[in-house]
Image: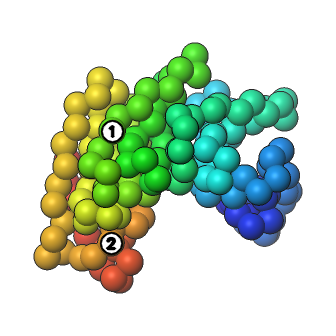
Amino acid sequence: LVTLMQANRLAVVGRNGIRSEVAVPLDGAYPAMATAHRDGSVWVSLNQRGALARRDAAGDTELITLPDGAAPVGIAAAGEHVWSADIARGSILRVDDDLQVSDFALAPDSRPHAVIADDTGCWFTEWGTNRLGRITAEGDLAEFDLSGIGEEPHGLALDGDGVVWIAFESGVVAGLRQ
């Protein structure tokens, strides 16, 4: 599943290329990233609309409105939560199964971007402050300074051994063992 931001669409990609495309129901929403949820739904961060969209297996779409000024980018689902990075307001958002949104504020200049989740919480990049963050489902926050490793952490991956992999815009890739 990939987002076509400026085209305002999502594409389902398989081994033989694009299998289907789905329009995002709001003009100019700028779908930044997408994730699959355990219930079969697809969640999308709508960066320019300050919202998340949830499309269920039947094709029905529901918008989850976020706090004023929100600009979600990264999004990931694990367990009973969907997590998103709000780059504009410097916060991490958690949406529960009942669609209630919790807002965890970070430093205003943190500019969180990428998110990766597991059953206990999420990892996220703080692009503006060169840090990696971890927040649990209970809201416990830990941050790790990445100075001297790379600049502008941008992408994340979590492997089966519990290593969080960070891709930096400077071309460096580094791993942090949990």
User: Which label number is shown at residue 105?
Assistant: 1
Q: Which residue is mark 2?
A: 152
Number of residue marks: 2
Between the C-alphas of marks 1 and 2, the distance is 20 Å
Residue drawn at x 19%, y 49% is 143
Under tag 1, what secondary structure?
Answer: strand
Query: Is 20 above or below relative to 174?
Result: above
Q: Residue furthest top?
A: 98
Query: Quadrant where the N terminus lies?
Result: bottom right
Q: Nearer the viewer, residue 80 or 28?
A: 28
Q: Is residue 90 visible?
A: yes
Image position, residue 87 (x, y; %): 45, 54
Q: Amino acid at mark 2?
A: Glu
Query: Is 46 above or below relative to 63?
Result: below
For this view, does 116 lie left or right of residue 14? left
Residue drawn at x 29%, y 28% is 139
Classify residue 51 by image quadrant.
top right
For this view, does 165 lie left or right of residue 140? right
Q: Residue furthest bottom?
A: 171
Classify residue 61 by image quadrant.
top right
Q: Residues within 10 Å of mark 1 (few under 14, many from 20)?
A: few
User: Which label number is shown at residue 96?
Assistant: none
Q: Amino acid at mark 1?
A: Ala
Image position, residue 101 (x, y; %): 50, 26
Mark 1 or mark 2, which is nearer to you? Answer: 1
Q: Nearer the viewer, residue 79 or 89?
A: 89
Image position, residue 129 (x, y; %): 26, 63
